[in-house]
Image (cartoon, rainbow, N blue to C red):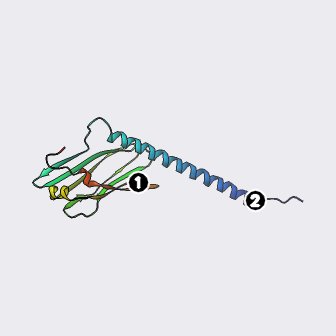
Amino acid sequence: MKTRTPRGAWALRGVSAAVALVVILVVGTVAYSAYQDYTGLKAELGAGPGRAVGSATLQGSAEVVSINITVPNRGMYTLNVTVSCAPTPGVSCQPAQVSVPPGGEGVLHFRMAVADVSQFLATPGARINGTVAIGLVPFAGLTIGVDLGAFVKAPGGP
């Protein structure tokens, strides 16, 4: 005697196949968008020899570091980029954020001031802990810890 599969089981198989297809499509578009955004940002930061995205200005014993980066969004989702720094004695910074719609461009303006640059550079192991957060709204995000002190230059140095 043959048993029949209930209709509900067939319906659940169809639903699970549809959910699997949607998950595959979403993961594929997020991966594609992340790759397009990565290659666009890499091309922007590496476009041309000696391209400067930042500057350091000495004002007395203080140094002001300004970083301006054009952020292209070649992907399919809104791209959010945030740069900030942790509280550090003698250092002040203005966190920067830009939200770029698909197919658009935005400029990220980050500014940091070191009160006494000579003392900062003379301190062994001196760091300015910062974070760079990148997100593909609403699906994925990545936060990276960086040493923003690497942008601080010696007075009169390169």
Picture quadrant of residue 130: bottom left
Describe the element under mark 2 as helix, strand or loop: helix
Q: CA distance from mark 1 to mark 2?
A: 43 Å
For label 1, the crowd category at 10 Å Cα-Cα, with few meaning under 14, some 14 to 19 and many 20 or more, is some
Q: Which residue is mark 2?
A: 7
Taking the image as shown, residue 18 lies to the left or right of residue 131, namely: right
At label 1, the amino acid type is Gly
- Residue placed under numbered mark 1 in the picture: 135
Q: Is residue 89 above or below residue 71?
A: below
| Of pointers 1 and 2, the one earlier in the residue sequence | 2
Residue 13, disc = none
Front in this rendered view, residue 126 or 21: 126
Image position of 128 (left or right of 60): right
Give the farthest residue toward the left.
60
- Residue visible at 24% across and 63% down? 88
| Residue 153 coordinates in the image, percent (x, y) | 20, 49
- Where residue 12 sits, quadrant-wise, is bottom right
In the picture, which quadrant includes the C terminus?
top left
Residue 105 at what x, y percent from top left? 34, 44
Between residue 57 and residue 72, name the one nearer to us.
57
Q: Residue at x 41, y 54 (%)?
A: 135
Q: Amino acid at mark 2?
A: Arg
Name the secondary structure under disc 1: strand
**Number of numbered discs visible in the structure rendering:** 2
> Residue sitting at 79 percent across and 59 percent down?
5
